[in-house]
Amino acid sequence: IASRDLSVQLAALDCVGVWKLESVRPVVAQISADKSASAALRAATIQSLTQLGGAASLKTLSEIAAGSDDENVRASAVIGLIPLNAAK
C-alpha cells in the first residue's frame, strides 16, 4: 500500500480485503477518507473495507457516504454498505 505505483497499491488493497488483513484496516480507513487520494485508490479502499466487513467498515463507509466527497466516491461507499447492511 505504501508503494508509489498505483497498480501495486490497488493489488495490495485487493489482497487486504480478500485475505481479511485486519491489521491493515487503520491504514485502509485513513486512505479511504483522504480527499487528496486518487478516485481509483479510494474506490479500492472502499472495496477492501466492504470485504473486511464488520462494524468498523460500516462506520467508515457510512461516514464517507454521508460526507461532502465527490459524488462517485460517495456512491462507491453506498454500494459498499449494501452487503454490510444485509449482514446485520
Image (spheres, helix red, strand yellow):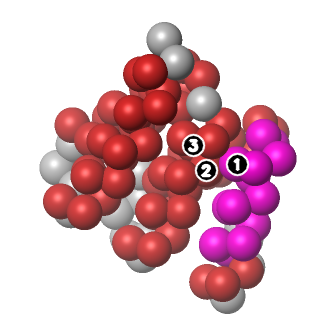
Q: Quadrant of residue 29?
A: top right
Q: Is residue 41 left or right of residue 8?
A: left
Which residue is labeled 1 in the image?
17
Looking at the picture, how far across and down is residue 14, in whole percent? 69, 61
Cα separation between marks 3 and 2:
4 Å
Q: Secondary structure at mark 2?
A: helix
Q: Quadrant of residue 60?
A: top left
- Kindly identify which numbered label has been placed on residue 80: none
User: In percent of the image, x 41 and y 22: which residue is there?
Assistant: 85
- Kindly identify which numbered label has been placed on residue 48: 2
User: In percent of the image, x 41 and y 51: which residue is there?
Assistant: 33
Query: Is the residue marked by circle 1 packed among few (<14), some (14-19), or many (20+) residues within 10 Å?
Result: many
Q: Is residue 45 left or right of residue 62?
A: right
Which residue is labeled 3 in the image?
49
Residue interval drawn in magenta: 9-21
Q: Secondary structure at mark 3?
A: helix
Looking at the picture, how far across and down is residue 39, in whole percent? 38, 72
Among numbered discs 2 and 1, the one appearing first in the sequence:
1
Query: Label 3 is placed on what type of residue?
Result: Leu
Magenta span includes 86: no
Cα separation between marks 1 and 3:
7 Å
Mark 3 touches mark 2? (CB < 8 Å): yes
